[in-house]
Amino acid sequence: MEIIFESLAQYGVLGLWTATLLYSYHQTKKNFQERYDNINKEMLEILKENQVLLENGLREMREDRLLRMKNPN
């Protein structure tokens, strides 16, 4: 990245302005990617928790149905 800044600095103010735009874009993209990765991790954890809850609920429903079939009272 420093090589790019040095090359752009040869063009004076316009080159430095371009370098700051590139750096700003790079930082924004980096920050966005970090937030995107964190959101994906959080969503994956939520989905895993929901899967466990659904499996437990279905298991309880099956067990309840079996108990009602054995004891129709």
Image (spheres, rainbow, N blue to C red):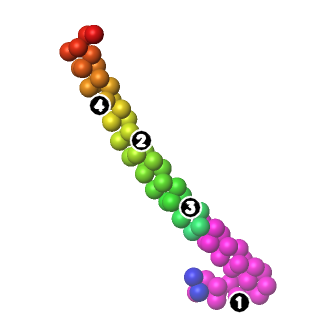
Q: Residue at x 48, y 54 (%)?
A: 42
Sequence-wise, the earlier of marks 1 and 4 is: 1
Q: Amino acid at mark 2?
A: Asn
Q: Which residues are magenta?
A: 3-29
Q: Are marks 3 and 1 in contact (CB under 8 Å)?
A: no
On screen, residue 30 above or below 42? below
Sequence-wise, the earlier of marks 3 and 1 is: 1
Residue 43 position in % (x across, y down): 48, 50
Which one is nearer the viewer's eye here, 46 or 38?
Answer: 46
Which residue in the structure is indicated by mark 4? 59
Which picture quadrant has residue 28? bottom right
Which one is nearer the viewer's eye here, 45 or 57?
Answer: 57
Q: Which residue in the rendered view is the most extreme toward the top?
A: 73
The CA distance from mark 2 to mark 1 is 57 Å
The CA distance from mark 3 to mark 2 is 22 Å
At numbered mark 1, what does the secondary structure look like: helix, strand or loop?
loop
- Select label 4 or label 2 by which is in front: 4
Q: Amino acid at mark 4?
A: Arg
Which picture quadrant has residue 64? top left
Q: Are marks 4 and 2 in contact (CB under 8 Å)?
A: no
Q: Are marks 3 and 4 in contact (CB under 8 Å)?
A: no
